[in-house]
Amino acid sequence: YHLILETPKGNLLKAMHGINGGYTAYFNRKYKRSGHLFQGRYKGIVVDKDNYLVELSRYVHLNPVRAEIAARPEQYRWSSYPGYIGKERELKWVEYSWILSQFGSSIKRAREKYKGYVEEGLKKRIETPLKNVYGQIILGEEGFIEKIKLTLKGKDLSREITERKRLMVKLNPEEIIKKVAETFGAEEVAIKEKGRKDNIARKVALYFIHRYSGLSNTEIGKIFGGIHFSTISKASFRLKEEMAEDKGLARLVRELDSSFKA
């Protein structure tokens, strides 16, 4: 399941422990079972509210449709979406006002516009905002990412938040390029060179440097011939699309990923 939560007190770990633990206990009692219900720990992403929250809310509300659980988002029983568009009464524990305020000051008009915005995703293919996640934990513009990294710097991060530790692990971009070049039989210079089309090794190198170097998109752009920072995220998204169609490519990328994590 997906939740969008605001945690001004920084108590997400405690909250998720309560939610998952409470539901597991309820489920086990109801179905006379025991043991864990959820596989692994929850995945949390810090979100740049001003630049990504509206887009992310649409993504979450359309998840049941993408998963073919419901034909329309408002038909999914466990969604807060009906409350956003006025189809059902608002839930007391859901904060609707901020997202709706981005669509107008009139609540009726805001609901209509938000519904139209969400339904755009039913009519045409939209990219997931999660394609821009940095270090597997931050979704935001460069300034926001740097702010979060500075906040985490030097802090004693507990073992429970292993995803955050990845922000502190930095791999040398030149070593990444070298390893990608060896794997794909490409020249390192060709990987860095701007303007070459269908350069799969370049896309793979961009993907891993974005993921593991700790560099900003602007810094990565300079390594690859001065490309615009937005190209980095687009290249990663295109690579994932190609991997979905090419099992051989997907296998090579997985093997590289494992070697970088080792």
Image (spheres, helix red, strand yellow):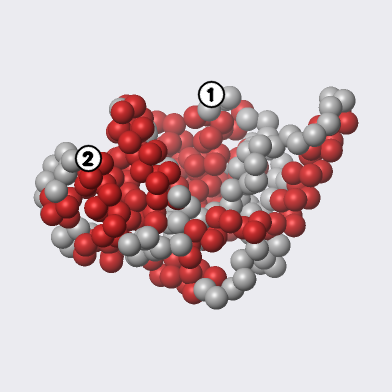
Say whether residue 39 is left or right of residue 131. right
Say whether residue 126 is left or right of residue 66. left
Residue 186 locus on image (x, y percent): 16, 44
Quick one: label 1 or label 2, which is nearer the N terminus? Answer: 1
Q: Nearer the viewer, residue 201 or 148?
A: 201
Residue at left offset 68%, top offset 31%: 77
The correct choice, above or below, for 9 with respect to 28 in the image is: below
Say whether residue 8 is left or right of residue 56. right
Residue at left offset 54%, top offset 70%: 152
Q: Which mark is residue 68?
A: 1
Three-letter amino acid code of the residue under disc 2:
Phe
Q: Nearer the viewer, residue 119 or 112?
A: 119
The correct choice, above or below, for 107 with respect to 156 in the image is: above
Residue 216 in view in this figure:
yes
Residue at left offset 44%, top offset 31%: 122
Whether pointer 1 and pointer 2 mark residues with C-beta atoms closer than 8 Å, the reply is: no
Q: Nearer the viewer, residue 112 or 128?
A: 128
Closer to the camera: disc 1 or disc 2? 2
Residue at left offset 71%, top offset 62%: 11
Quarter of the view holding residue 151: bottom right
Distance between the Cα atoms at labels 1 and 2? 37 Å
- Secondary structure at badge 1 equals loop
Label 1: how many Cα within 10 Å (few below 14, some 14–19, many 20+): few
Residue 232 in view in this figure:
no
Residue 150 locus on image (x, y percent): 49, 74
Residue 196 locus on image (x, y percent): 11, 46
- Secondary structure at badge 2 equals helix
Q: Which residue is mark 2?
A: 184
Three-letter amino acid code of the residue under disc 1:
Glu
**Which quarter shows the N terminus?**
top right
Quarter of the view holding residue 242: top left
